[in-house]
Image (cartoon, helix red, strand yellow):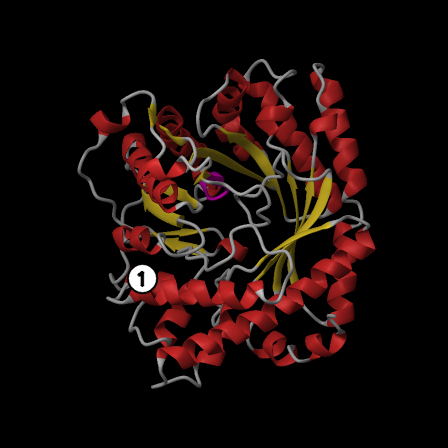
Amino acid sequence: MINVLEVNETNKMVEHENLDIRTITIGISLLDCMDSDLDKLNEKIYQKITTVAKNLVPVGQEIEREYGIPIVNKRISVTPIAIIGSSACKRPEDYVTIAHTLDRCAKELGVNFIGGYSAIVSKGMTKYDELLIRSIPQALNETEFICSSVNVGSTKTGINMDAVRLMGQIIKETSEITADRDCIGAAKLVVLCNAPDDNPFMAGAFHGISEADEVINVGISGPGVVKTALENCHGESFEVMCETIKKTAFKITRVGQLVAKKASEMLDIPFGIIDLSLAPTPAIGDSVADILCEMGLEYAGAPGTTAALALLNDQVKKGGIMASSSVGGLSGAFIPVSEDQGMIDAANAGMLTIEKLEAMTCVCSVGLDMIAIPGDTSAETIAGMIADEAALGMINQKTTACRLIPAVGKKAGETLEFGGLLGHAPIMPVNTAKCEEFVRRTGRIPAPIHSFKN
């Protein structure tokens, strides 16, 4: 049984070590909203979301007051909109009207983001998938709270290189159309391989078609708590360090489990999963990179970084999975550059490169996350970077992703400023060797042999 005494044990973590619940996310199925009439479709979407999630923010605030645990974000994820708009949308602009409806819901409800302006094209791309994808730049330019994602590959299906090539262009367009706001549109767009159906974290969250009609998913955090715990491990063995991380992850996840169960009870919505990822913020002391340094590295990116991150990721999962009966989403350690001051410092010092980050993504939660790149990077080069990350996910049977931000008019060494949770991003140099002939090939990279498990 989880009780308030366990929460009281975490008071120090909350007050001094940046422990928080990163998000309570309500997943909402919009399948019953589908309609061939675009106006009726938008009205149904608006009515369902504003009805189901009407108490999300007040409930989150009440839980914060009752337990003294900050809940940083209250969010919504919905069924991939490419599917929901398939009957009514005949052109990209039709999908944009749905984006406006979702944005209106977010404003009325007071949530931070709505995820699910998404398409799943890992094996092939329907006409309505393509229409939604081509609408993404306009949709993210004209809305404030919408996050978009496209899944271009999986271990079971391989990598849809036609979609990868298209997403290289879409990322460029999205960045260019929002250049007056430091390319913020691209910061809310992610390209995935092996996307999970129950991820509560943005920008990749959507409500998968395998999910129930409504569900509560909670994403926890706490890099600062883990770092503080490791401060007592200088000179100790790997066994001691692993046990320390594992026990700390257990405590953090128990708090998340309590909040999830309480939110489920108060909202009368079934509890789905706890995503026990370590998600950093720009705040000092809330950095995954700082954990790696506390483990004995001068900078994130130093030799040994991938091994240290693999250890961290595994122990977080081992501790978390003992604390909750339902673990899902991504679960592990995020390594976004713009949202992690330690990663920013390492990049500015020249100790962290995109190639090293790519290696690190083999053993962490996600992929090249919140990486600002020079504005003159070609769409084909971006597609090549997406293909590389998708290949890592496909072969390793894990989720990988790219959230790349071409900094229009800026070069490596300069900075993009987003503010808030997204922080600021140093613009990192990109390998300039050309890959156009490779990414312009049509079709699909086949699934690996180990995908055949039936």
In the picture as drawn, the residue positioned furthest to the front comes out as 454
Q: Residue at x 48, y 78 (%)?
A: 244
Q: Residue at x 49, y 68 (%)?
A: 223
Q: Is residue 287 visible?
A: no
Q: Is residue 79 above or below residue 69?
A: above
Q: Is residue 372 visible?
A: yes
Q: Nearer the viewer, residue 366 or 98?
A: 366
Q: Quadrant of residue 177?
A: top left
Q: Position of residue 209 (x, y in %)?
A: 63, 33
Q: Position of residue 71 (x, y in %)?
A: 66, 61
**Can you say which quadrant of the picture contains the N terminus?**
bottom right
Secondary structure state at the residue bearing disc 1: helix
Q: Nearer the viewer, residue 91 or 180?
A: 91
Q: Is residue 168 above or below residue 409?
A: above
Task: Categorize mark 1 by other alpha carbons within 10 Å: few (<14), some (14-19), many (20+).
Answer: many
Q: Quadrant of residue 356?
A: bottom left
- Give the magenta range: 185-190
Q: Nearer the viewer, residue 121 or 202?
A: 121
Q: Position of residue 194 (x, y in %)?
A: 46, 40
Q: Position of residue 273 (x, y in %)?
A: 64, 53
Q: Is residue 144 left or right of residue 390?
A: right
Q: Quadrant of residue 401?
A: top left
Q: Is residue 326 left or right of residue 376?
A: right
Instruction: Name the residue tied to disc 1.
Output: 306
Residue type, mark 1 in image: Thr
Q: Does the magenta portion include 360?
A: no
Q: Residue at x 30, y 61 (%)?
A: 348
